Image: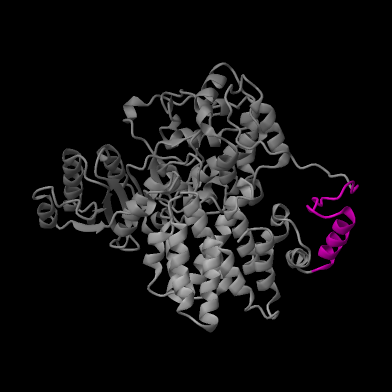
Amino acid sequence: MRTVWAMVCGTIRDQVDFSLVMDYLLRSREQGIIQGIVLSTWDHELDELGSLKERLEENGVAIVTSPTNDEMVADMRANSVNYWRQAKQMQAALDLIPTDAIVLKTRTDRALPATKRLVAMLDEPDPLPLVSEKAASLNLEKIPQVFDHQIAIFKARTGRILQFTDFAFMGYSKDIRKLTNFDIADLTFTRSIVANIQFFIYPFIRDYPIIRDYYRVVNFYPLLKDLAKYTENGGTVFPKFFERFYAAYFGLLALHFRIGSLPDKDKLGKITPPIEFSDLFHSGQGKHLVHDLLGVTLNSQEILDTFMAQPVHPEDNQSTRQHWWQKKQTLPVDRTVVKQEATKQVLTNIQNLSVEMLDRVTNEELLELKAFADNQDFSPNRWLRVQRPIFAEQPIAYKSSMRYPMPGISEAEQEKLWHECEESDGANQVLYRYWLHHMIEPKDSPAYLMSTARTDNRFSILTVSRLLRRGLVNEETKSEILRINNFFASFHVRHHRMNAEIASYVLARYMYLVESEQKIPAMADEQANYVFRRFLPGKYGAFKDVVKEPEKLVSFFDQAVSERQGSAQQRVLEMALEVTHNEKYWTQLEKKFNGRYEGYEYAYRYGIKWGLI
């Protein structure tokens, strides 16, 4: 015996709508049509709604609440925020529902008509057929079957692919769970894919790569109106990609979804074959196809089934398989043969759907799409997203080297240096060693040091940070130095590592921010504080008090130097020199050099020679 549960998700905006849908579901439960009801909403949502919570509990409605994720998604610049909110509530409800149940998903407002239609489907022996059965009856067994059973939906569309109304839909729990997706990579889509597309697209975008490519290549928004005008004016020619894509989409739709009708039957007229492919982009067929601002809606399953069952050639003889409880018979098919070549191609593609036909857009198709994008009759708006060049055979000839000129040295030296880089397993180390043994001018040094700075060479980071403070780098290099400095300083502070070079480049960046009158980021403050905790504990506050007063800074460090001996004094001298650039600290520090640390000593001698410290 099957079990049916209803889950009502959302914020309770309208208590009239909410009470109507809840009373209807409670009556349905009393009649044995459904067996359980879950309300999934946000924490504290019911706190200010009087006795509503008590009445829900009195009626045995399960209530699950979740903390909002507004803080988590506040800075997301994707169209996935609403989806994420709704999926979170759905997941919370699904956790309370038996895993083998049919789930009727509805919402707290505006969903009563769709809910009634879904409940009416439950009177049928098999309201949600097995996808494998549909595949066999439609001869679509060669394309992926993502669900076990069909999901009942409303308002399938031909322009907004896989956009159905999310007010209410129904499926087995195992299949509904496939609609909840928390893959961060997918949630950062920047395409205009709204929540009620995202619910239904996620289960298919991996097995049906053509669906993902449609959204990647096509901006469907301008086409919603333009294709209606194009086809109403007699347009019947479409890109080959559209013919292949819509065959895949209709096959997917027919297999995995049952399209319910929201309009009453008496408001839908008779379907009159042939239904041409061009008819699917404007209103017609007795309101089974309705165009509005959101594109064309399929208002019935019948319109899709009739389109797909049409004969392409007069000799075609189609029959339809029934379920086991139906009397075996061959259903008559209207013998009217479609006329338009695009329709014939789409129907032929449907009959031959395979995994290969679901592949991504080809270069040939993209070329044709570009030609259609230039056709003002097809659409006067820019609807093709991808403007990249098409792959072409490349010439074999190697005409010129890609080397960029290394600044500050002769062509002969450049040739020698590039040769050494080519022979080495680490070109960045070759460049650093060259800089280390040749007195390269400051304006030329970033070309030799930035690559090793990016790989945590502390002397490189220190030198380019000094160049930054002295204003000797362009804007692009400046931003990269700030990024590198902050990244590695944060890394070393987080892992409790600190030495002279790290301390000095942390202070170089800190003083750059102070002297350029920028706000000190919390991270920079934490890093500088860590330097002082390590080498001048308890003195960071006093340092910040005088950081903008050069004379007081010198006095501050004079006292700190005098209070220390040995390596502790050397660390303070390094800090004093980095912050104040006072020559007396260099005089004292140089005496402590012993020739054992080439990179360390050269970084200081280079800085003194060129006035960087």
In the image, taking residue 156 as reference, residue 455 lies left or right, namely right
Q: Which residues are magenta?
A: 397-424
Q: Quadrant of the N terminus?
A: bottom left
Quadrant of the rendered structure where residue 274 is?
A: top right
243 is within the stretch colored magenta: no
Q: Please tell me which residue lies in front, 181 or 438.
A: 438
Q: Please tell me which residue lies in front, 27 or 613.
A: 613
Residue 278 locus on image (x, y percent): 56, 26
How many marks do you count on the picture?
0
Whether residue 244 can be seen here: yes
Whether residue 488 can be seen here: no
Above or below, 140 relative to 457: above
Q: Please tell me which residue lies in front, 13 or 556.
A: 556
Q: Can you name the residue that lies furthest to the bottom here?
A: 566
In the image, taking residue 293 as reference, residue 462 lies left or right, namely right
Residue 545 locus on image (x, y percent): 37, 60
